[in-house]
Image (cartoon, rainbow, N blue to C red):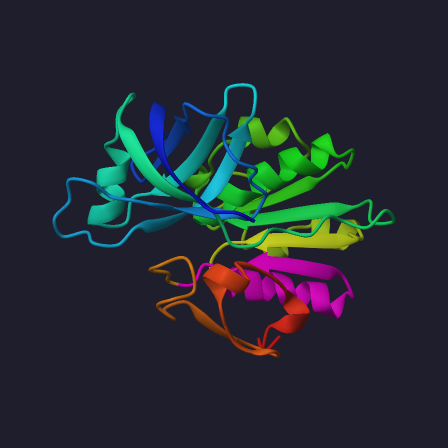
Amino acid sequence: MKKYILDLIITENVNLNDRYVLLKATSREPLPEMLPGQFAELRVDNSPATFLRRPISINNVDREKNEVWFLVQVVGEGTAHLAELKPNDVLNTVIPLGNSFSKPGAEEKRLLLVGGGVGTAPMLYLGRTLKEQGYEPEFLLGARSASDLLELDLFREYGPVHITTNDGSMGEAGFVTQHSILSQVRYDRIYCCGPKPMMQAVAKYAKENSIDCEVSLENMMACGVGACLCCVENTKEGHVCVCKEGPVFNIEKLLWQI
């Protein structure tokens, strides 16, 4: 897909909690096509110590408002500056980058979208897209505590939501792979994004149950176009750049010990 360097205009900055903000941005021209699983490289202005753009997943696309959403976790100086953007500020963006999640086959009816932490971000747009395509996705979202669960009302617009928290403050206590729904329902396909240990656990469950599974890797990235070799992942096809060949991979291509 063609990539664009766009000066987006911030329309809203929603403070979700003390570590996450939701940036909504628009363009003077119609936004380009963006697929679930793709990401953007956001330039950080007015931050002398921040030289590189920050890779952020596409959280949602609202075609009626010509908006794209970015869920930003504040973890350092760069993301802290992004979190301070105000309506009408300019956000220079390279978009869309990477590949996307695969469309399910006609026979794949039971779809489970698993997200943990900031990895829930691409699951919202994927769920919305699947719903618009006539599927009935379900979500399994994991977090450390109830306060870390984000955009639940939006997720519920597109399908049933199952929840786990480490401390048991919402949903079932434990990790996503310990949720009771996995022993009650046979899913045809699983999509997943989150911390690597979580994705590996989900991949192991999928492999043991012969379920097709795709994961969106969160390797450290710099350039976003495959030039710096910062995000290399070892696969059955050799070493590949996650930003260019991914971030979405079928688990059968990964050399994970699962």
Residue located at (62% from left, 29% from top): 156
Tell me which segment is drawn in magenta. 196-219
Kindly give the residue lying farthest to the left in the view shown: 48
- Residue 85 picture location, percent across and down: 26, 30
19 and 129: which is toward the camera: 129
- Residue 51 picture location, percent across and down: 20, 54
185 and 57: which is toward the camera: 57
Residue located at (48% from left, 72% from top): 233
Give the position of the C terminus as an image quadrant: bottom right
Judge left or right: residue 171 versus residue 138: left
- Is 199 inside the magenta-drawn segment? yes
Number of numbered labels in the structure image: 0
Judge left or right: residue 15 versus residue 238: left
Kindly give the residue lying farthest to the right in the view shown: 107
Is there any visible trace of residue 46 in the rendered image? yes
Please determine whether, in this image, residue 109 is positioned above or below residue 174. above
- Residue 151 picture location, percent across and down: 50, 31
Please determine whether, in this image, residue 236 is positioned above or below residue 189. below
Is there any visible trace of residue 164 in the rendered image? no
Judge left or right: residue 204 versus residue 28: right
- Residue 27 picture location, percent across and down: 41, 26
Please determine whether, in this image, residue 25 is positioned above or below residue 97. above
Please determine whether, in this image, residue 133 is positioned above or below residue 100. above
Residue located at (52% from left, 38% from top): 170
